[in-house]
Image (spheres, grey):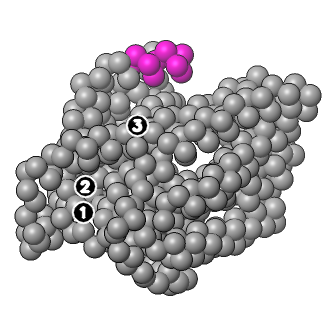
Amino acid sequence: MDQTSHPSMAVRPFSVTHRTVLAIAVPMTLAYLTTPLLGLVDTAVVGQFGDAALLGGLATGALVFDIVFTTFNFVRSGTTGLVAQAVGRGDEVEQQAVFWRAFAIALIAGFVLAALAPLFVWFGRWFMGADQGVGDAMETYVRIRLLGAPLSLINYAILGYVLGRGEGTLGLMLQLVLNGINILLSILFGLKLGWGIAGVAWGTFGGELAAMLLGLAIVLRRFAGGQPIARGRLFDRRAFGRMISLNRDIMIRSFTLLAAFALFTRQGAQFGTVTLAANAVLMNFFMVAGFFLDGFATAAEQLAGRAVGARDVGAFRRAVWLTVLWGLALAAAATLVALAFGTELIGVITTAEDVKAAAVTYLPWAAFTALSGVLAFQMDGVFIGATWSRDMRNMMLASFLVFAAALIVLAPAFGNSGLWAALHVFLLSRGISLLATLRFKLRTAF
């Protein structure tokens, strides 16, 4: 149920410049870069107890949450697209309505996730197959973190509303509050009070709570000065149905993406422990580049959505062009840095000589993932902002099938190099298929 504007709606032109793009992308890139810092602090805190089982439990628990909350990221991205379109139409009442619908979905989904804590614990134990100590530590972490699931998803809704309005600096502030308080409380509870992995989990809960309270205070104060929403407008069945349909498609897309990377990891494990570890080290290059690319993908979400709402095809084309241009520049820079300094960076990440040697061998494959993936990042942002979720979902599913076929053909023939080549095929397939679809959508959307 993708939205297309009615022909009778007036065009509301606006200017898209390099400054417009950077005003959203730069703050959000900085915000996204705080996430690995948080993980590093949590690991350092738990590592002070000298118990490998605690570190294993933290890693396992974090993996469970990566799966759950990446899948539920639709609360953020779907809200961004719908709010951006309302901004483009100049409809302030609909901006409020979109937020409250997202808030309701986040609250319900969050309580469901909290109630399913025993199921996630069981899944984590089964999937990892780790020993009792690791499993117990993971259970402690997961159960506490899931108590904060409603807070996490409400924060997604708040961030989606903020980014939909193009307020990247406010988004950065909220993320700094969330991660900053998280870090401070994790150190206080986990290390100073000696609560260990439970302290780290409660620290995250505290950060989520603080960010939610601050975000809600800002949003409610803004709404207090605006036009009140009629109950019929807020609970409009068609609008709720459209949001649920949009969220469903984004959820399927996110889950398929996770499945592709899980398949990549599983296939790497078939080549031995050293290759598995080397691939894990090398994926850090792609993940760090992804944080930068995500900033410009977020800019693409807001600007593309605003252009669709404003029925301004010129602004839409320029938003696509500028965000892709900046994405390509950043991807090229990330690739050059990885090629020039990758060997030294691998040495920082791991001291195991066999893993280091294997990682250096396959470094060029990892270095170029930023370039092969840039179009996928940016097109995802464009399609989310325009709420063309069905097309994005379908292209992701098709690309996953292409990836699986490439894996079947290339991995047996070329080993780990074939595995990395299949990943490049997957990334390129996503970007190119969406770009080809974009040309068709432009003929019908404006």
**Count of numbered marks:** 3
What secondary structure is found at the residue carrying circle 1?
A: helix
- Is 301 rendered above or below residue 53? below
Residue at horizontal 13 percent and vertical 67 percent from the top = 223
The answer to the question of whether label 1 and label 2 lie on touching residues, with beta carbons closer than 8 A, is yes
Q: In this view, does 294 lie above or below 72?
A: below
Q: Which residue is denoted by mark 1 in the rendering?
A: 95
Is 204 left, or right, of 69 in this rendering? left
| Mark 1: few/some/many CA within 10 Å (<14, 14-19, 20+) | many
Q: What segment is highlighted magenta in the picture?
A: 121-130
Give 2 or 165, whichever is nearer the viewer.
2
Do the residues under discs 2 and 3 have CB atoms within 8 angstroms?
no
- Would residue 221 be counted in the magenta stretch? no
Instruction: Please state the horizontal and vertical placement of residue 247, each as a whole percent of the image.
Output: 38, 42
Q: How far separated are the C-alphas under marks 1 and 2?
A: 5 Å
Q: In which image quadrant can residue 269 be found? A: top right
Local SS, label 3: helix
Residue 248, disc: 3
Looking at numbered disc 3 in the image, what kind of residue is underneath it? Answer: Arg
Asked whether, in this view, residue 403 is left or right of residue 391, the answer is right
Name the residue carrying label 2: 98
Which badge, 2 or 3, comes first in the chain's sequence? 2
Tell me the residue at 81%/25% (across/down). 408
Residue at the farthest front position: 8
